Image: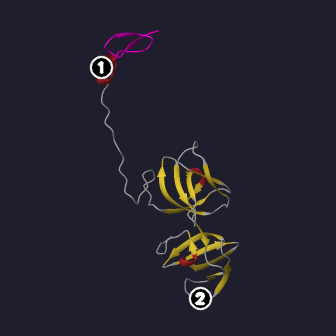
């Protein structure tokens, strides 16, 4: 088998070129500048959205992998639709997420939704008709209930769950920051 290497015209038998010919071929190649993307520690390199941030599980199941790719083994499977998840890192089409207990891994972005949800972390959390402690209680939710965020302000969130709506303190929820405002 014969082949010509680069522009120096060296003919090589059996596909093995002398070291000098290999070095000449490398030197003849134009230099491509290496550009590294520098990202802020609190902003995702892919989306330019803040990190960490909260999203929800789009479907009823999502595999969390050890690394960002289908070749990495599955470490965890999320099985609750609407489950709030915290994104802590981004790599191409993959997001590193964790749940309220810190379990998680790398999930393909197509399994996630920007619809905000929360997990009730206080047993029998009281939901009020207004964002005040002295407002009328309109519902209670057990520990572990998932609700959809309608709005948040001043340490309170208006949440919809099981046909109910009400205001609850952010301290009784996981999936929103204590001082976060959501319109």
Question: Along the line of sight, which residue is nearer the eye, 176 or 64?
Answer: 64
Q: Is residue 182 above or below residue 75?
A: below
Residue designated by label 2: 135
In this picture, which residue range is highlighted in magenta?
Answer: 1-18
Residue 72 position by quadrant: top right
Q: Residues within 10 Å of mark 2 (few under 14, many from 20)?
A: few
Q: Give the side of residue 95 with respect to residue 23, left or right.
A: right
- Distance of label 1 from label 2 (alpha carbons): 81 Å
Q: Is residue 112 above or below residue 119?
A: above
Of pointers 1 and 2, the one earlier in the residue sequence: 1
Whether residue 82 is situated above or below residue 12 in the rendered picture? below
Residue extending furthest toward the right: 162
Q: Which residue is mark 1?
A: 24
Secondary structure under the numbered disc 1 in the rendered image: helix
Is 9 included in the stretch rendered in magenta?
A: yes
Query: Residue visible at 56% across and 88% down?
Result: 133
Residue 157 colored in magenta in the image:
no
Q: Check disc 1: other Cα within 10 Å, few if <14, some if 14-19, many if 20+.
A: some
Horizontal side, residue 47 vs residue 145: left or right? left
For image coordinates 47% across by 62% down, the residue present is 52
Q: Can you give x and y, in whole percent of width and height, for residue 183 in the image?
A: 51, 70
């Amino acid at each position: 088998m014969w082949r010509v290497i680069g522009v120096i015209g060296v003919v090589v038998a059996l596909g093995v070129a002398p070291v000098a010919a290999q070095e000449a071929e490398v030197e003849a190649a134009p230099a491509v500048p290496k550009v590294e993307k520098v990202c802020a520690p609190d902003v995702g390199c892919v989306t330019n959205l803040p990190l960490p941030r909260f999203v929800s599980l789009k479907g009823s199941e999502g595999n969390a992998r050890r690394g960002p790719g289908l070749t990495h083994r599955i470490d965890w499977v999320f099985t609750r639709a609407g489950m709030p998840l915290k994104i802590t890192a981004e790599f191409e089409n993959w997001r590193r997420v964790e749940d309220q207990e810190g379990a998680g891994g790398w999930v393909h972005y197509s399994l996630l939704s920007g619809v905000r949800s929360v997990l009730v972390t206080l047993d029998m959390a009281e939901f009020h008709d207004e964002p005040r402690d002295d407002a009328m209680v309109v519902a209670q939710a057990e520990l572990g209930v998932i609700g959809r965020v309608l709005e948040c302000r001043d340490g309170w969130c208006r949440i919809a769950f099981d046909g109910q709506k009400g205001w609850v303190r952010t301290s009784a929820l996981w999936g929103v920051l204590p001082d976060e405002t959501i319109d």
